[in-house]
Amino acid sequence: MLQDLIKYYEKDCDEENRLQKDNAHKIEFLTSVKYFEQYFTPNSKILDACAGTGIYSFFLAEKGHSVTSGDIVPYNVSIILDKQRKNPILSNVYTGDVLDLSRFEPNSFDVVLCMGALYHLQTIEQRDKAISECLRVLKTGGIIVVAYINKKATALDILNHNLSNMDEILEYHSSGIISQFYGTTPEEIELSMNKFTIDKLSNIGSDGLWFLLKDKINNASENNFHKWLKYYWTLCEDENTLGYSLHGLFFGKKT
């Protein structure tokens, strides 16, 4: 499983450019950082435990936070290190698994970002272990951010035009597993978080139905795009439509 994941990020996924390639993809980044700014206190000590190639790590460090950035994929970490050499603003960079954060002492961080691990952890035990480790290194009163994939939206995204892959869709809806990925629902995420000493702050759709509207979004003027973004932000916590955002983001406070 790990080798498949490493191969995916090395060969099949342009993670470095994914959130900036066009306006439709930018919605996820812009929505996420809007909520960061709402919940993170200035000069926080932050662990970005599933950092990918570091887009959020560097953004937060530029904002004055002390950021430790890590990822399980060596290729991703090599990109972070290359950017760090050019712009040395991160506090620390490491290669490691969110399931084992033993390199860090308990109660070390004001904020822990778990933004990627739950995309790939396919058992309840693994997912619970990831959240438990994040909470162990998070200070009481600190903020945990957990990203997840919505399986309802993913099912719509992967439907082919003549519906001939419905057996695959139904199996995915039942198991939540397709290839290296795990999909869930906002309700299931909240039930999972309720196992722990976490108070919910927000559960948001971080990108909405961009995958169905991408041509309209990308062909819009910058002025109309920003109007769309502001409109989407009035909807992104709506429980009636939350599951139809391709990506979700849960914000909680450790109690």
Image: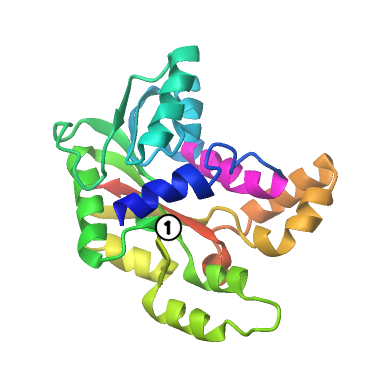
Above/below status of 69 relative to 251: above
Q: Which residue is mark 1?
A: 148
Q: Nearer the viewer, residue 208 or 86?
A: 86
Span colored in magenta: 23-36
Q: Nearer the viewer, residue 203 or 68?
A: 68
Residue 133, percent from left and from top:
20, 46
Number of other residues with Cα within 10 Å of mark 1, as a class: few under 14, some 14 to 19, many 20 or more: many
Asked which quadrant contains residue 240, the reply is bottom right
Residue 220 located left or right of residue 166: right
The residue shown at (51%, 80%) is 169
Principal secondary structure, stretch drawn in magenta = helix
Above/below status of 92 relative to 169: above
Residue 23, percent from left and from top:
71, 45
Above/below status of 128 relative to 144: below
Residue 185 located left or right of residue 127: right
Q: Is residue 22 visible?
A: yes
Residue 149, percent from left and from top:
46, 61
The residue shown at (53%, 65%) is 242
Residue 255, percent from left and from top:
22, 48
Q: Nearer the viewer, residue 90 or 204?
A: 90
The residue shown at (58%, 43%) is 18
Instruction: Name the image quarter holding the N terminus.
Output: bottom left
The residue shown at (57%, 81%) is 165
| Residue 26 magenta | yes
Instruction: Name the element at disc 1.
Output: strand
